[in-house]
Amino acid sequence: MEFPNLAFKLAFIKPFRRPHETKPTILAWILFSIGAGNLVYQNFGMLIAMIFTKNDSIDIVLIISETGSILGLAMVALCKMTILFAYRKDILSILEELENYFPGVLKVHRCCRRIQYRVKYFAEFSRKMMKITTIFFMFAFLVYNLIPVGQSLIEWLVFGLHFQYRYQSNTWYPWNGNTVIRYTLSYVCQVYSSLAGVAFIMAGEFMLCFFLTQMRMHFDFLARALESLDAVEVEADPGCMNFLIQYHTTLIRLTTEINHIFNISFCVNFATSSVAICLMGCSMVMGISLISAVRYSIGLLSFLVFTLFICYNGSIFTQTSAKLHSAAFYHNWYDASPKYRKTILIIIMRAAKPSELQAYKFSKVSMETFMDILKFSYKLFTFFRAME
């Protein structure tokens, strides 16, 4: 939970607080409310600014591309925030159950005690993936917020031009105007909204990664336990098969609960990414300067990174759960009695369809889905280029 907790600290909130833990301070709630409020307003402010922009000076396709691309990130972040709070009780329940099933706490049947959990392997793999993602999002956050003011300062100090009040995105505020106080207020509001957006995107991604890493560890243990079974020994101890079947049933149920929590988020992520990747690409090639191209390239990479993060985790989770089918089949069940064969058949039939994450049954969360998103985005990109 190191990196999920880091994301929650950036959002100034602890949504998964146990009863014995201290409540967030009043200052933390105020800072969270400011960030969340700016994130919610960002969606409306950008739409208002797009409606009132004079279309005779700027191409309408460029306006749609710029607004839609940044709006997509705000919508994804808002969806993550809503999901984490709407399902906070369910998430806490799964966390407590996974804690009870963690190696050293779960009472493993004696037929499986010679099999060791690969805790360190899965922990290091997950930690490395979340660390790289954290570094990228922090870099993207800094670049996104520093480019506008940095460009204005360079023009003012180096080239002697008038200081232009540039913002991170074209968002309407009631106090907009060409004064230092109004500019600073608008700029800080957008910094807070982007910080909240990055924090909740990271929190949602990392909680999903945390759950899937735990589930992969259990599926891996169960697959290796089934593969090492001696049917003759197990048949003499009926409690072993009961433990394995109950263990598998629990993993299937936990997968269903995790999917129930995140499937709305998957739908929003995939639908938004398909359009936003296209719009970010259009903004890059249609921008009026190299600086704007760099700024939108950061947004494009952000969509690619968090979509790849979800799809890759879903794909390796499915691959790990798929090992159960062959592991249950390739042991000496043929040396056992017909009753044992019928029992092992239950696991084989259940494992015939690997556990996987679904975006409301529209598509599964996998690398194939990631490639489909890229293909669809490219088709939209060629369509917008034809409109230009």
Image (cartoon, grey):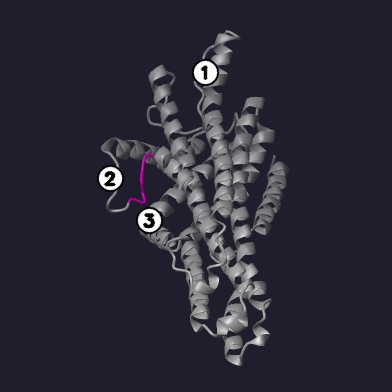
Q: Nearer the viewer, mark 1 or mark 2?
A: 2
- The residue under label 1 is which amino acid type? Gln
What's the amino acid at mark 3? Arg
Question: Please, what secondary structure does the residue beneath circle 3 have?
Answer: helix
Mark 1 and 2 residues: CB-CB less than 8 Å, in contact?
A: no
Q: Which residues are magenta?
A: 12-17
Residue 157 visible in the snapshot: yes
Mark drawn on residue 22: 2
Q: Secondary structure at mark 1?
A: loop
Q: Position of residue 298 (x, y in %)?
A: 61, 35
Q: Going 61% across and 82% down the picture, which residue do you hit?
A: 231
Distance from Cα at disc 1 to Cα at disc 2: 46 Å
Percent x, y of residue 57 = 60, 28
As helix, strand or loop, the secondary structure at mark 2 comes to loop
First along the sequence among labels 3 and 1:
3
Binning the other alpha carbons within 10 Å of mark 1 as few (below 14), some (14 to 19) or many (20 upward) gives some
As rendered, which of 127 and 335 lies closer to the eye? 335
Q: In the figure, 51 relative to 163: above or below?
A: below
Instruction: Tell me if mark 3 has few (under 14), some (14-19) or many (20+) residues whose alpha carbon lies within 10 angstroms of its own.
Output: some
Circle 2 or circle 3, nearest the eye:
2
How far is the residue under mark 2 from the one under mark 3? Answer: 17 Å
Q: Magenta residues: mostly which secondary structure? A: loop
**What residue does disc 3 label?**
88
Mark 1 lies on residue: 164
- Residue 143: say if magenta: no
Q: Type of residue at label 2?
A: Thr
Q: Earlier in the sequence, mark 1 or mark 2?
A: 2
